[in-house]
Image (cartoon, rainbow, N blue to C red):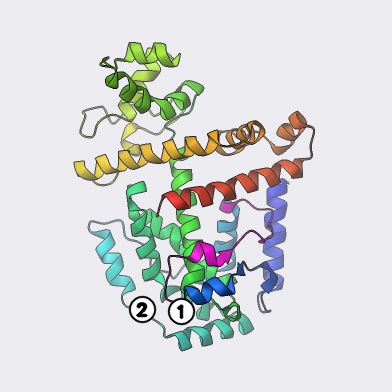
């Protein structure tokens, strides 16, 4: 059995044992009481108020934590409103969640304390559904970074459930303050993972082009040089075929290309699978601009890392087939656990870095 599966099973066993007990309040992020009082009526300072640096590591990846939440709160996840996939799906979803009443501060505190004491999933559900509008509000702030806002809402809902399961009212913050960070984190992680999953770069050539094609085009145009595939290929030391393929994937909105062209040599996905749900040209352009901006900021983040951290980041977080922790540890003469700690730190730093950019 792999370490991740062992950790996950242990995590689930521990969750089962403590289902009806009080939560371990030591795992909660620390709250800056002074900043909290100064910002009691504002939700924009959540990152300053809540310090997550002292959160212990469960030994799970974020994806595994999501699965744990789904498994430990089945009654909650199965009954949450699920964004519809029909036309006008966002409006339908908004109409559906509007049926749930907002809780007064007093009602919220009472439910939270009762949930802490009993572990009753029905109480957790009331807390979650009363804050679904908050998830939509935050997801809309990120909509330009992902084509389908309903996906962001789904991820944000998972973050909200995580917040409800950990929230401690006696720390002084409102649930909405605390939940905002978790919602943002899950949405941002989904956006970053999605850019990797669309497989815009699956080979070294494609990865180089993914980060540099648009930049090289702009540089050549600024010098009055036509940015044809041959010139770009020579300047970036890649093949013309690779330039043509990436140019097509990142091409102008509305260009006519076959939607049946495979994304990669070993992939069953097609170009059509990569298209946003909307066919509106303006939205398509906005999406591509957001994608380009995000990849540029990600590149800047990587460039700011030490050489060792750059290598670990690329091998563990950007590689479609991540190298094992032990393999990287052997390269640097350190323990497997040390590499895992560095990876976790890099991911946390990336979340903070990107959160400042995507608001």
Left or right of 259 on screen, residue 238: right
In which quarter of the view is residue 306 placed? top right
Residue 158 place in picture, x, y as percent = 49, 62
Contact between labelled residues 2 and 1, with CB atoms less than 8 Å apart: no
Residue 23 place in picture, x, y as percent = 66, 75
Circle 1: element type: helix
Q: Is residue 86 above or below residue 162?
A: above
Dot 1 surroundings within 10 Å: few (below 14), some, or many (20 or more)? some
Mark 1 or 2, nearer chain start: 2
Is residue 244 something one can see in this rendering?
yes
Choose between 33 and 341: the one closer to the eye: 33
Main SS of the magenta part reads loop
Does the stretch in magenta take in 45?
Answer: yes
Q: Which residue is mark 1?
A: 126
Circle 2: element type: loop
- Start-end of magenta stretch: 41-62
Number of the label disc, if any, that sits on residue 244: none
Residue 194 place in picture, x, y as percent = 44, 44
Task: Give the tally of numbered discs.
Answer: 2
Q: Is residue 320 above or below residue 32?
A: above
In which quarter of the view is residue 52 placed? bottom right
Structural distance between the alpha carbons of marks 1 and 2 = 9 Å
Left or right of 1 on screen, residue 76: left
Left or right of 133 on screen, residue 161: right
Is residue 162 something one can see in this rendering?
no
Number of the label disc, if any, that sits on residue 100: 2
């Amino acid at each position: 059995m792999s370490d991740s599966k062992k950790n996950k099973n242990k995590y689930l066993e521990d969750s089962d044992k403590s289902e009806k007990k009080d939560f371990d309040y030591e795992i909660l992020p620390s709250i800056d009481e002074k900043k909290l009082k100064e910002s009691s009526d504002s939700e924009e300072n959540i990152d300053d108020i809540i310090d997550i640096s002292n959160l212990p590591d469960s030994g799970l990846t974020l994806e595994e934590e999501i699965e744990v939440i789904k498994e430990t709160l089945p009654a909650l996840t199965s009954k949450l409103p699920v964004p519809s996939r029909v036309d006008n799906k966002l409006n339908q979803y908004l109409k559906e969640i509007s049926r749930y009443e907002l809780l007064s501060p007093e009602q919220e505190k009472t439910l939270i304390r009762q949930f802490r004491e009993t572990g009753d999933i029905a109480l957790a559900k009331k807390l979650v559904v009363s804050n679904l509008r908050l998830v939509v509000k935050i997801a809309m702030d990120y909509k330009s970074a992902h084509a389908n806002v309903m996906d962001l809402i789904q991820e944000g809902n998972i973050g909200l459930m995580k917040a409800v399961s950990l929230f401690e009212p006696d720390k002084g913050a409102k649930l909405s303050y605390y939940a905002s960070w978790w919602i943002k984190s899950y949405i941002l992680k989904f956006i970053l993972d999605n850019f990797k999953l669309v497989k815009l770069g699956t080979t070294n050539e494609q990865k180089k082009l993914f980060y540099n094609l648009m930049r090289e085009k702009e540089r050549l145009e600024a010098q009055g040089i036509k940015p044809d595939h041959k010139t770009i290929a020579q300047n970036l030391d890649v093949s013309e075929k690779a330039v043509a393929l990436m140019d097509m994937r990142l091409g102008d909105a509305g260009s006519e290309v076959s939607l049946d062209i495979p994304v990669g040599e070993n992939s069953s996905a097609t170009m059509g699978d990569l298209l946003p749900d909307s066919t509106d040209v303006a939205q398509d352009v906005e999406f591509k601009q957001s994608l380009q901006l995000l990849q540029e900021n990600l590149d800047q983040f990587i460039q700011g890392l030490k050489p060792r951290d750059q290598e670990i980041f690329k091998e563990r977080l950007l590689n479609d087939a991540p190298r094992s922790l032990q393999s990287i540890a052997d390269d640097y003469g350190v323990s497997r656990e040390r590499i895992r700690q560095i990876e976790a730190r890099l991911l946390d730093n990336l979340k903070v870095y990107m959160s400042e950019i995507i608001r």
